[in-house]
Image (cartoon, rainbow, N blue to C red):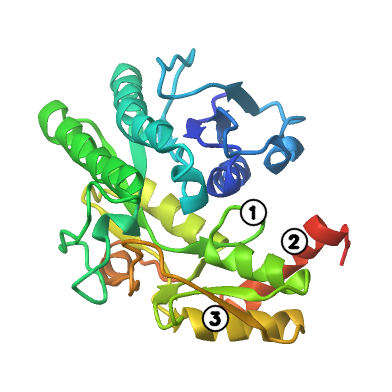
Amino acid sequence: MSGRKSVLITGGAGFLGSHLCDRFIKEGYHVIAMDNLITGDLKNIEHLFKLEQFEFYHHDVSKFVHVPGHLDYILHFASPASPIDYLKIPIQTLKVGSLGTHNLLGLAMAKGARILIASTSEVYGDPEVHPQTEEYWGNVNPVGPRGCYDEAKRFQEAITMAYHIHHGLETRIVRIFNTYGPRMRLNDGRVLPAFMGQALRGEELSIFGDGSQTRSFCYVDDLVEGIYKLLLSDYTQPINIGNPDEISIRQFAEEISQITGVELKFGYQSLPENDPQKRRPDISKAKSILDWDPKIERKEGLKRTLKYFKKELFNEKD
């Protein structure tokens, strides 16, 4: 490995994982991506296969994980992340958050590696505190349809902290808020790709409820920068990484209509059970501890994402 530091990135063929692979390659690391390809796609990392400092393992981390050689860091990003996925495969979602995390914590112990766990704003559930601070414990229904994802992530945080406290393992926990950008799947069910796909196909934009619920969207490059800073920091408690620029779903649909140049048409549907009504991160800790805050404004991020989706749908180059 020519003296390079090495990092294992699980979920490495997914949306976030593939962008992290790019970042660590750029920083000079030897990168090992691991993915079972249930929701990931090799096209997200095919540009890396020609590189000597990149490896790919097709593996399910819910089963025993073996990686030969030295590891400096592990980033655990293997998990379905959209409702359309985790509602379809709830047991696999629970297993990757529990068994998978346990396996990777054990690997980190064996390798003497620092491990960063990808948690989520969904640990806050449908919040009664707004904006959400890291001290808020959340309002989650463990037996509702979203429980398979929410509770998998809450368990993931708990076992990670247990390894940190009882074994002295070097751990980091990032709570990721809504993130968007190139390599999202058009059919993954999340609001931004759903809206963009519908707009580009000339369909009605699906509004669940009355559209007054809010989200806060962070461009993927900003998120990756925050994760990178957190991994290399000394901070061991959970930390929010996201963009606090809050917008209602209806207003967001209007923005998508404007940026795609498509006439706005709404199609209203019933609100899913336990769907969060508000979502906005308090990023005070990220600002003060990591010296991080998002730089890319939503208008610019949406332009970059639209270019990617046009290529996906119509094979447009520009």
Q: Quadrant of the C terminus?
A: bottom right
Chain-order first, disc 2 or disc 1: 1
Q: Amino acid at mark 3?
A: Phe
When the figure is inspected, residue 65 is found, relative to residue 146, above or below; the finding is above
Q: Amino acid at mark 1?
A: Asn
The residue that disc 2 covers is 308
Q: Position of residue 153 (x, y in %)?
A: 30, 44
Chain-order first, disc 3 or disc 2: 3
Instruction: Please give the name of the residue rendered at 19% of the width and 30% of the height, measured from the top-left corner.
Output: 163
Of badges 3 and 2, the one in the foreground is 3
Q: Amino acid at mark 2?
A: Tyr
Of badges 2 and 1, the one in the foreground is 1
When the figure is inspected, residue 20 is found, relative to residue 125, above or below; the finding is above
- The single residue placed furthest to the left in the displayed view is 166
CA–CA distance in space, label 2 to label 1: 14 Å
Instruction: Please give the name of the residue rendered at 46% of the width and 52% of the height, measured from the top-left corner.
Output: 83
The residue that disc 1 covers is 187
Asked if the residue at tag 3 contacts the one at tag 1, i.e. Cβ–Cβ closer than 8 Å, the answer is no
Q: Secondary structure at mark 1?
A: loop
The residue that disc 3 covers is 252
Question: 200 or 225: nearer the eye?
Answer: 200
- Whether residue 218 is visible, yes or no, is yes
Q: Quadrant of the N terminus?
A: top right
CA–CA distance in space, label 3 to label 2: 19 Å
Chain-order first, disc 1 or disc 3: 1
Mark 2 residue crowding within 10 angstroms, few (<14) / some (14–19) / many (20+):
some
Q: Position of residue 32 (x, y in %)?
A: 56, 28
Instruction: Please give the name of the residue rendered at 22% of the width and 54% of the height, measured from the top-left corner.
Output: 141
Q: Position of residue 39 (x, y in %)?
A: 58, 39
**Residue 117, picture quadrant:** top left
